[in-house]
Image (tube, rainbow, N blue to C red):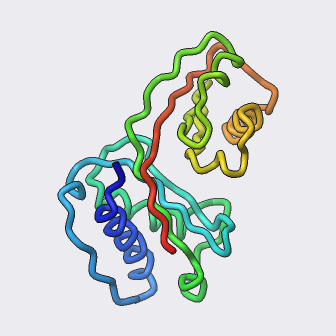
Amino acid sequence: MSDPALGATLLTMARNAIGLEFGAEPREATEHPALEQAGATFVTLTQQGRLRGCIGSLEAWRPLRQDVAQNALAAAFRDPRFPPLSAEELPATRVEVSLLTPAEPMPYADEADALAQLVPERDGVILECYGRRATFLPQVWEQLPDKRQFMAHLKQKAGFAADWWSPDIRLYRYRVEKWREA
């Protein structure tokens, strides 16, 4: 189901949004009909395979072209885990764009049931509880292939203890179509 033309356009648009902040000449991006539709994206920046920024939208609420550009800028300049990207870093920075499907509620009986339902490398997961929310894209399975570890780190990301569980937790799952610069 991958759309290579859409992927190439989104990658170019993300890089252009960041590059324009440094006065770089934008690359030509091919138009695509999906760009005007509402879309939810995450833009991930890496350097030598290590995370350098990742920001995104969990719900589609603005046109895809705007969502990817704004998330690219946020990943480059407003990810609180990193200092703003510098012009000198840009050539060594690789861009990845993930286009999310709508999140679907994941009913479960208990934590063991929730873990049994997860599909590693395919499911992105949103955890919500007590006004806190965290997500892991499906790509996080590459670093955390064990379901228990994956969930423990997701709980920690939301500000809870790794071994904590509550019946008030709401889980949602989604899938992504992703494209990465070479």
Counting the numbered discs, the total is 0
Foreground residue among 108 and 59: 108
Q: Nearer the viewer, residue 80 or 167?
A: 167
Tell me if residue 39 comes above or below residue 72 in the rendering. Answer: above
Does residue 94 lie above or below 100 as drawn?
below
Residue for point 54% across, 69% down: 77
From this view, report whether residue 112 is shown above or below residue 182: above
Front one among 121 and 86:
121
Q: Position of residue 120 (x, y in %)?
A: 62, 38
| Figure check: 9 above or below 135 | below
175 left or right of 48 in image? left
In percent of width and height, residue 163 lies at: 81, 27
How far across and how far down the image is residue 111, in percent?
70, 19
Give residue 117's quadrant in the image.
top right
| Residue 72 locus on image (x, y percent) | 45, 65
Q: Residue furthest left?
A: 33
Residue occupying the far front of the picture: 1
Which residue is painted at 34% across and 62% down in the image? 4
Does 62 sit left or right of 57 as displayed? left
Q: Residue at x 45, y 55 (%)?
A: 178
Give the residue at x 39% y 62%.
70
Task: Determine whether, in the image, residue 51 is placed left or right of residue 96.
Answer: right
Q: Is residue 167 left or right of residue 74?
A: right
